[in-house]
Image: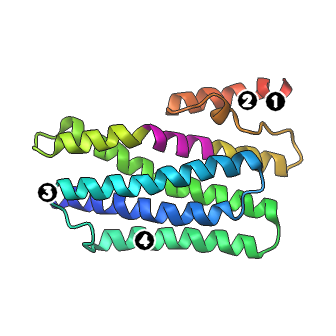
Amino acid sequence: MKQEIVELLLQALETEMGGVQVYQTALQCAVNKDLKEEWEKYLEQTTHHVEVVQELCGALGIDAEKETPGREVVRHIGESLVKAIEMAKKAGDPKAAEIVACECVVLAETKDHLNWELISQLGKESKTKDANAMEQAADEVEDQEDEHLYHTRGWARELWISSFGMKAVLPPPEEQKKVKTAIGAARAQQARDSMRKG
């Protein structure tokens, strides 16, 4: 198997493991009840995603414990996001900490989303015997990853808007409309003005 594919899968595993820590820490900052419920669901899903990548590594004969420079970087980024959330929490403004937690989740989920997009692409276009295993793993996880990214990005936007003293749409349109695509997220964001007035 190509070294780059092994690298991607090990980074994907590390991203999911870091995601568990990011969600655990972010949950400590969730002030909004709906956001807390959403993140509890995402934490459970992300914990399962760790298992999915571990199983995928096993099926492809990849040592899930193998360290690579890229994996170390991903771990460092995840740990930095956790520290950023903890820093915001210590500052003593719960609503500001909630926004920081949201932004950190968005950053973590952006990498996660890219990983699964690439795994899906490999599964669909690769001519290797391992393509089917990658495609099946991506099919299981990809919709949830879309939701994690687009919904939390909507939460971050609306929490910021609320912090300005403006009328926010909470839960955000992305959640209300159950968005799972970039096009859906753009449409939900466009619809927010009418939802805000309604």
Q: Hey, which quadrant is residue 137 in on the image?
A: top left
* Amino acid type, mark 3: Lys
**Mark 2 and mark 4: span between their CA atoms?**
36 Å
Image side of residue 93 versus residue 50, left or right? right
* Amino acid type, mark 2: Arg
* Amino acid type, mark 1: Arg
**Mark 1 and mark 2: span between their CA atoms?**
6 Å
Q: Residue at x 36, y 46 (%)?
A: 116
Instruction: Look at mark 2 in the image and give the residue it sits on.
Output: 192
Q: Secondary structure at mark 1?
A: helix
- The answer to whether residue 125 is above or below residue 99 is above
Q: How is the image coloured?
A: rainbow
Q: Give the crowd class for mark 2: few <14, some 14-19, many >=20 residues within 10 Å.
A: some
Do callouts 2 and 4 mark residues in contact (Cβ within 8 Å)?
Answer: no
Q: Residue at x 19, y 62 (%)?
A: 62
Q: How many marks?
A: 4
Q: Secondary structure at mark 4?
A: helix
Q: Is residue 135 magenta?
A: no
Do callouts 2 and 3 mark residues in contact (Cβ within 8 Å)?
Answer: no
**Mark 1 and mark 4: span between their CA atoms?**
39 Å
- The answer to whether residue 178 is above or below residue 163 is above
Magenta-highlighted residues: 143-152
Q: Nearer the viewer, residue 99 or 28?
A: 28
Do callouts 1 and 2 mark residues in contact (Cβ within 8 Å)?
Answer: yes
**Mark toward the start of the polypeptide (3 vs 4):** 3
Q: Secondary structure at mark 3?
A: loop
Instruction: Look at mark 3 in the image and give the residue it sits on.
Output: 2
**Mark 1 and mark 3: span between their CA atoms?**
50 Å
Instruction: Look at mark 4 in the image and give the residue it sits on.
Output: 75
Instruction: Look at mark 1 in the image and give the residue it sits on.
Output: 196
**Mark toward the start of the polypeptide (1 vs 3):** 3
Q: Is there any visible trace of residue 19 in the rendered image?
A: yes
